[in-house]
Image (cartoon, rainbow, N blue to C red):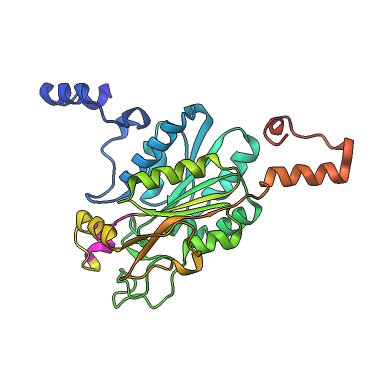
Amino acid sequence: MESVLAGLESPVACAVEDDPHPIGEWLREERMPHIWCPGCGIGTTVNCFTRAVDDLAIPKEEIAIVSGIGCTGRVAGYLRLDTFHTTHGRAIPFATGLKLAHPRTKVVVYSGDGDLFAIGGNHFIHAARRNVDLTVLCVNNFNYGMTGGQMAPTTPEEGIVSTAPYGSVEKPFNLPYLAQSCGAVFVARWTVYHVKQLANAIKTALTKPGFTFVEMIAPCPTLFGRRNKQGDGLAMLEAYRERSVIKNGADTREVDLHMEGPIVCGNFVNIERPSYLTTQVDRMEKVLGERYVMPDTWRGVVR
């Protein structure tokens, strides 16, 4: 903080010191200003996430953030936690290894829709299938924002992006349905307009054992919003408010997103299923009996 304030005029510096940012303790303020465009929704998701962690009183040394590449991937660089900014699409396998080596650490994958569901899509479905004890937070802004607004696996049909100037003709992924189909034990979707609901969903995801997933719909006014004449960030938030329909427990097969029409939000799935570690230990004990020696780092976590 001192290095940031060093070059500022004293009235500004005094104002910042007297009125610290509400989530300043969670941020690497020496890395500010951030790279996100005006009206981008990623910052709001960070606010919801830090408030959720703060409410749960999770010690900072017991949580780690893993991100891939893209605008959302920069979250790892801004949070004052143990964070890992990994290669494109590989956040989930990196996080899986981290979780197996340090099972007491709450491991969170925080990345965008392109990173997680295009190049990283295979990793997502297998981690969910295995029920690896991870929380995956996905900022869905419907395009590749960092690299020019190309089409993503979540771009709605007829959505205009740089690689589909006449509108996408591809059916996008329904992320909650995909997550549930692959075995996630908690699945939710909220927009950044729903800050309280989003923070509460993140808290549930962080506290529930197994593979948990929260889709966070956020505006990208610079690329997706501008091309599709959706206005600035505030106008896109107003559209979220007007279009959102809250249906907790909704059938995820019926929550597809389109350029127009309702945005179904809610906590859709909350089930119980043994996590990967528990399943692994159960099997080894059944087959090997007393010959099986559980890794020391797993003791007290599984049994």
- Would residue 145 be counted in the magenta stretch? no
Residue 208 percent location from the top left of the image: 56, 42
Q: Quadrant of residue 221?
A: bottom left
Position of the N terminus, as image quadrant, is: top left
Residue 289 percent location from the top left of the image: 88, 39
- Which stretch appears magenta? 218-226
Can residue 85 be seen here? no
Left or right placement of residue 188 versus residue 95 in this view: left
- Would residue 223 be counted in the magenta stretch? yes
Position of the C terminus, as image quadrant, is: top right
Q: Residue at x 50, y 68 (%)?
A: 253
Q: Quadrant of residue 30?
A: top left
As drawn, 149 above or below 16: below
Residue 97 percent location from the top left of the image: 62, 43
Q: Residue at x 71, y 43 (%)?
A: 278
Tell me the chief SS of the magenta region.
helix
As drawn, 184 above or below 282: below
Q: Residue at x 44, y 46 (%)?
A: 201
Can residue 26 be seen here? yes
Residue 240 percent location from the top left of the image: 29, 59
| Numbered disc total | 0
Left or right placement of residue 274 versus residue 56 in this view: right
As drawn, 254 above or below 205: below
